[in-house]
Amino acid sequence: MKAGTKRAAAALPLILSSALLFAFDFGFELSNSVGGKYVSDLDWFTDHKGTVWINVPFDSAGHSSLAVEGGFYASRPLGSDEYTWFADLDLFRLKLNPGSSGGARVSFDIGRLPESDVTGFVLGQNVDGVEIHGIFPFGNIDVFAGYTGLLNTRKGGALMTSDDQSDMADNADQPYGIGSKRAVGKVTLQVSQVFGALDVLLEGIGEYDLRPLMESDYSEAASLGYGTLSLTAPLGSSAFATLSGTWQSGLKESGGSEGSSNSLLASARFDAYPSAKNQFWGQFIYTPLRSDFFDVFTPVSYQSLGTLYARNFENLMRASAGWNFNPLKTFNLDFGGKVFMTAQTTDTQPDLYEGSEVSAGATLRAASDLKFRLDSYCWIPADGDMEIQAALKAILNF
């Protein structure tokens, strides 16, 4: 037996005994929802999910631990009379914290991890990989590297090309089918109070399409990078303003021809907390019209700009606002509205105003292990039929 194997075998009982020494948590969650959508006719949909989770700490403080979560999904989508189902490993995170020294602390996350970017528009999905978290006197640094090709395509999220879309469609009746094959990297630097109370965050994200290296009959490929600068400053004691800009650059290939893909997304956001039970927020985003220089802004993870709004980021302005109200510990309400506009009118998009989407929701915790969630949406287009959608979800924890 090799020395490395002997050491691993010798360490296994220690890890298992540590897991047994410190209490671990586990549970089961059932989520069932039913809803309807009305345009000119009423159509129904259902979603069901069963989740098993376990958290095993390796020390008394919980700094090092193993968290695993798996789910079984079943649904009857809109416009279909058949149920579809699939299974997924939602989370597998091994957290290691070697300790701290000289005011600095470094920790590691390894496995299937939920990843997102600071804007919420570029990356938002699980990725298999390794993330390093560094806390230093000058600021915080996070570094991540991972791969999307082992994810279930039904939950992967990286739908950047027609091939990615085809993979998802082809695996629509499979319990576990893999899809887009991309290497993903992220580096985030956060420095607090750079100028007075101003916080600065710099973030770089890159994805490299591995499909051309692994397949010979692909149609499209996209390898893109994103750089974000985000500035956050307080406005008084209970309000904050955030300005961010994200630049996209890279290469797209389609039909055997390759070209550059440059675009940008600008965002301004305001959050206010006038009391412990209230939050108000507003946001404005902008992406440019496609031109000889600008391409369509294409995030790594599929992003829905509205629940009922179907268009992508091209030539877009969106103004949104919302209110979250928590009158009781067991009950809360939320209201929101989004106005969609074209950034620049064209022959194919002659109108500035596209439509508005309003939403209202409520959550009721009926018991410590049971809660209900009601969501409702209404799409009011500038031209066309109004759409209404509502769904009621029940969540039971064991």
Image (cartoon, rainbow, N blue to C red):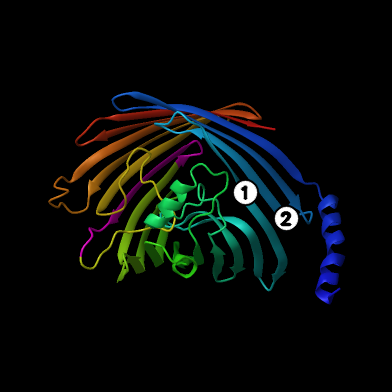
> Circle 1 is placed at which residue position?
89
Amino acid beneath label 1: Leu
Looking at this view, is 61 or 95 the one in front? Answer: 95
Residue 389 position (above or below residue 302): above
The stretch in magenta equals 274-291
Query: In which quarter of the view is residue 35 placed?
Result: top left
Amino acid beneath label 2: Ser
Label of residue 65 in the image: 2
Majority SS type along the magenta span: strand
Q: Secondary structure at mark 2?
A: strand
Residue 112 left/right relative to 58: left
Indicate the position of residue 376 as horizontal and vertical percent values.
40, 30
How would you rate the neighbour count of disc 2 (Cα within 10 Å): few for under 14, some for 14-19, many for 20 or more? Answer: some
Indicate the position of residue 242 as horizontal and vertical percent values.
39, 56
Residue 130 position (above or below residue 341): below
- Residue at 50% x, 65% y is 184
Indicate the position of residue 211 as horizontal and vertical percent values.
46, 65
Residue 98 position (above or below residue 158): below
Q: Secondary structure at mark 1?
A: strand
Looking at this view, is 36 or 330 the one in front? Answer: 36
Say whether residue 238 is visible.
no
How would you rate the neighbour count of disc 1 (Cα within 10 Å): few for under 14, some for 14-19, many for 20 or more? Answer: some
- Residue at 85% x, 51% y is 21
- Disc 1 to disc 2, how far (Cα)? 17 Å
Check the picture and name the quadrant holding the C terminus.
Answer: top right
